[in-house]
Image: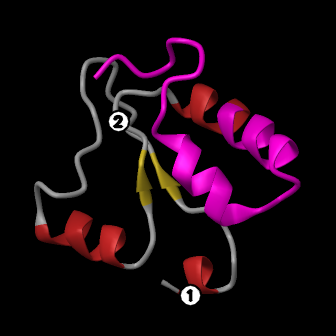
Amino acid sequence: KKMSQSGRLVAITSQSMNGAVDLQLYDCGKQALDSGAIACGDMTTEAAIIKAMYLLGQFDGNIQKVRNNFTLSLAGEITE
């Protein structure tokens, strides 16, 4: 929550090759979502990092615009 409130992007990925992040599934995920975290779905950690770098550059560091576009598939990095 402190990270989100300080204007930082908090994105949660999974190490599972076959799974996806669903922050609505369990209570701890719901708390993360309520605190401002973004679920990366089935994006790999590497894809999420590059996507964050790309979007931060496109929107001049405007976290709200980055958040609004983070869950959109830009290059097939999200399949669900």
Which range is magenta? Answer: 51-80
State how far apart marks 1 and 2 are (Cα): 23 Å
Residue 74: quadrant of the picture? top right
Taking depth in this image into account, of 54 and 21 the one nearest to the observer is 54
Residues marked 1 and 2 touching at CB (< 8 Å): no
Which circle's residue, 1 or 2, is located before the other in the chain? 1
Mark 1, Cα crowd under 10 Å, few <14 / some 14-19 / many 20+, is few
Vertical relation: 2 (above or below) 57: below
Residue at numbered disc 1: 2
Q: Amino acid at mark 2?
A: Gly
Residue 18 lies, in percent from the top left, at 26, 18
Quadrant (top left/top right/bottom left/bottom right) for the C terminus: top left
Residue in the image at 34% along x and 19% along y: 17
Q: Which mark is residue 45?
A: none
Instruction: Count up the numbered dots.
Output: 2
Residue in the image at 42% along x and 41% along y: 40
Residue at numbered disc 2: 41
Residue 62: quadrant of the picture? bottom right
